[in-house]
Image (cartoon, helix red, strand yellow):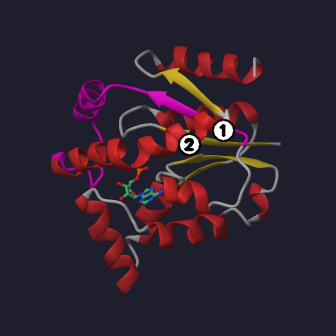
Amino acid sequence: MIKIVLIGIQGSGKSTQGNLLSEKLGIPYLSSGHILRNMAKEKTRWGRYVKETLNAGILISDGKMTPIMEEYLKKPEYENGWILDGYPRTLKQGKDFKEKIDLVIYIKVSDEKALGRLNLRSEHREDDTTEAIKKRIESFHTLTEPIIDYYRKKGILIEIDGERTIEEIHKNILERLNNG
Ligand code: AMP
C-alpha cells in the first residue's frame, strides 16, 4: 500500500504521469481538479462558486478543499492506497490533511516550458484561458512552493526533471520509487 502525492505546475505533465503510475502500481489516481470541474457543472450556489473560481484561475478555499478530498478518500476503492494529483496544494492544506503520505513526487518544469506545452495542446478546457493559466502559475509559486519545502524537510519529497519525454519521466519515477 502506498500513498503518493503529485505536485507540479499546470503543463508539467503530472496528470499523464499520475495515470501511467496508477496503471503500473495498480492503485487509483484521483485529481482534485477533475472533482472540481464536475462540481462546476452543478446548478447550485456551490457549483457556480466553483465554476467562477476555476475560470479565474484562483484556488478554492482551503477550508472547503480538505473535507472534499477526505470524503472522497473514504470510498472503498482508495482503501489500498492512492495517487493524488492537485491536492494538497497549499501549506494549510498540507497541514490540515490527516492522511499519512508516503511519497511526494514533484515534477519540475520551467514556467516557459509549461506555457509552451499548454499552447500546443489541441484540446483546451473551458477554464484554460491565458489569463487563468498565468494566474495558476503565479499561485503555484506563491502558494504551492512552500508546501514543497515542507515535504522536503519531512524527507518524503522526490524531485523529477519534467523537461523530458513522457516515457523518460515515467521510467525515472519508477527508478526513484524502487530505490527509495
Ligand atoms: P488542476 O486540474 O489541478 O489544474 O486544477 C484546476 C483548478 O481547480 C485550479 O486552478 C483550482 O482553481 C482548482 N483546484 C484544484 N485543486 C485545488 C486545491 N487543492 N485547492 C484549491 N483549488 C484547487
Q: Nearer the viewer, residue 11 or 146?
A: 146
Query: Mark 1 Cα within 10 Å, few/some/many (few <14, many 20+)?
Result: few
Residue holding disc 1: 154
> Is residue 128 covered in magenta?
yes
Amino acid type of the residue that numbered disc 1 sits on in the rendered structure: Lys
Residue 78 in the figure: left or right of residue 141:
right
Looking at the picture, how far across and down is residue 108, in whole percent? 44, 26
Query: Within 10 Å of the Cα at label 2, are there few (<14), some (14-19), or many (20+) other Cα atoms?
Result: some
Q: Quadrant of residue 48?
A: bottom left
Quadrant in which ligand 1 is drawn? bottom left
> Residue 93: in sight, yes or no?
yes
Tell me where residue 146 appears, x and y as whole percent: 45, 44
Q: In the figure, 88 relative to 19: above or below?
A: below
Locate the N terminus and report the quarter of the image it occupies.
top right
Classify mark 1: helix, strand or loop. Answer: helix
| Image height of 103 relative to 56, above or below | above
Q: Is 141 or 126 nearer to us in this picture?
A: 141
Task: Locate residue 118, reporting x and y percent.
Answer: 27, 35
The answer to whether 4 is drawn above or below residue 105 in the figure is: below
> What residue range appears in magenta?
102-130
Does the CB distance between marks 2 and 1 fall below 8 Å? Answer: yes
| CB of mark 2 near ligand 1 (< 8 Å) | no
Q: Nearer the viewer, residue 118 or 68?
A: 68
User: Residue 17's spot in the image, x, y percent?
Assistant: 54, 32
Residue topped by disc 2? 150
Q: Relative to 180, is 39 above or below?
A: below
Q: What residue sits 45% from the left and 55% below the top? A: 33
Residue at the image position 25 percent from the left and 30 percent from the top: 120
Viewport quadrant of the C terminus: top right
| Numbered label attached to residue 95 | none
